[in-house]
Image: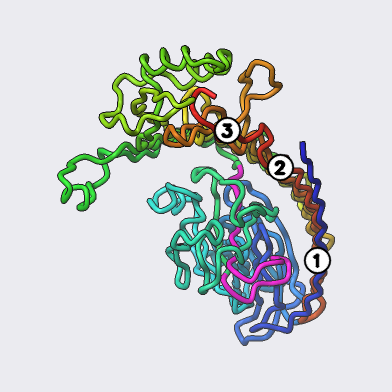
Amino acid sequence: MNLRRIAGYRLMGALALCVPLLTAPGARGQAISGNLLGAIQDPSGAAISNATIDAVNQDTQLKLTSTTTAAGEYLFSNLPAGKYNVEARATGFAPSSRQGVLVEINKTATLNFVLQIGAVSTTVDVSDAVAVIDTTTATIATTFNARDSQDLPVSSIGLGAVNLSLLSAGVASNGGLNMGRGPAVGGQRPRNNNFTIEGVDNNYRTVAGTLLVVPNDATEEFTLLQNQFSAEFGHSSGGQFNIIVKSGANDFHGSLYEYFQNRNLNAIDQLFVNSGVFSNPRFDQNRVGGTLGGPIVRNKLFFFGDYEYNPTGQSSSPGEVLAPTARGYSTLSTISGLNQTNLGVFKQYAGTAATPLANAAQFPLVSGTPIEVGQLSVVSPNYQNSYNAVASVDYNPTSRDQLRVREIYNRSVTLDARANLPVFFQIEPTTYHLATISEYHTFSPTLTNELRLGFNHEIATTPAGNFKFPGLDAFPNLQFADLGGLQIGPDSVSPQSTAQNTYQLTDNVSWTKGTHTIRIGFDGRRYITPTQFEQAARGDQCQRAGE
């Protein structure tokens, strides 16, 4: 056994000093949250200092409070994505509110108020949803919400919600050039992309691309950042792909769903029609699942869960190999010096051809004797079964603290059909986990902290099975050149396995002082990748039939 242990460390620190943008202090988008800022003025345009602003999440009733600076500016950092009811109040002025203010991840929404002079009992209430624009950055950001993930057909295949990025300008398919998994952003290779889930590293380090997939019905928002993103997004020059999962609310909500596509729904390729084929080859894919979310303690503690099963079956092309006929085996058994034990193993696994080749000149020779052989047609099953689960818990113990816990599980089971003979096919499992705990604390309206612990794990195994060969401790890999390359034995590269473990610690402090915002961040990661692989671990021999 050859075992390699690779450990890597990555540290990133960033200090950003943001100059005033419009009339409010600048604030960059958070990895898994959004920001809301603005200015409060009186009818003459003068700033109102010490005004109070409340932001209440419509789903969870999470209430956050901020006050304006001497310049009349306010800032909410690390708001969970969603719609908020926002109210501004100041002594001597009538309160003013806005309903349904949308906060998106990785974006800073700007919402300004003009308070009218009047009694406190008079309120200016705007009930229509307010369109907000991120005026604090030149980053090109495209956000897709939960409905987009569920309804747009491009998200139903492959990488899930990540495929929605193909609807953005400057994003294209990688064209199958094997330059990593995922789209090409701004003409760059997919290997330059960075993938995160809830701010946790989700990069597949072997082939580059996304590691875990979040089910569509568990995706709250997906955001693509294309340029000039802040330092916290880290190590890649390509697109920044970030997904956050759904959370619970004060009302119980759930769903049962099925997405499917198959050969009967798909149009027939014109090339098939031109060849006289008027039906599609097998392709049947189903995604069946359910979700449930709601309160554990109203206004304080919420949960959400999703589980889905995704089987996919496809057609296979038959493979052709040669094997002796019944007469051929009889001839082999009479050859002097031939190992009968080896012949018995060969016959057990290779099987017997029903019809000999028409051209006897193609019969292989063993000790100068021609052996009658015929063709064996092998049709390999072709399927993949995936199991995906998501669990999230949100806890708001005080108006100053938010705790978010996420667990994502993927398991993929495929059939390793790289061996020649079906008896040697093996189940090839791959398992993925991602877990994160994030804590947000508001020390004051001008000082906030974000702390996140993250972990992801992947293990893929190619087993060799428990096949026995007399006198050996492992079943060897045998290939017979004179039988059309017939291989007897498990997958020639088995056994092997690989794992990936990523440990992540992130902390960001945001401090607003006057018209400036200072952000200091730390991101540390440790990568551990144990791998088991040895060339021809079970031996590798090419020989003649019967030897």
- Residue 59 on the magenta span: no
Q: Nearer the viewer, residue 100 or 36?
A: 36
Image coordinates for residue 39, horizontal then vertical, percent: 66, 77
Mark 1, residues whose alpha carbon is within 10 Å: few (<14), some, or many (≥20)?
some
| Residue neighbourhood size for the residue with mark 2, other residues' Cα within 10 Å, grouped as few (<14), some (14–19), many (≥20) | some
Tell me the SS state at disc 2: strand
Q: Which residues are magenta?
A: 226-247
Marking on residue 204: none
In the picture of the structure, the residue carrying the numbered disc 2 is: 499
Contact check, label 2 and label 3, Cβ < 8 Å: no
User: Of the residues shown, which amino acid type is indicated by label 3?
Assistant: Glu
Q: What's the residue type where badge 1 is placed?
A: Met
Judged by depth in the image, the label closer to the viewer, 1 or 3, is 3
Q: Residue at x 44, y 34 (%)?
A: 482
Q: Is residue 292 visible?
A: no
Q: Earlier in the sequence, mark 2 or mark 3?
A: 3
User: Residue 273: in sight, yes or no?
Assistant: yes
> Mark 1–mark 3 contact, CB under 8 Å?
no
Q: Secondary structure at mark 1?
A: strand
Q: CA distance from mark 1 to mark 3?
A: 37 Å
Residue 278's image quarter? top left
Q: Earlier in the sequence, mark 1 or mark 3?
A: 1
Disc nearer the start of the sequence (2/1): 1
Determine the CA span between mark 2 and mark 1: 24 Å
Q: Which mark is residue 428?
A: 3
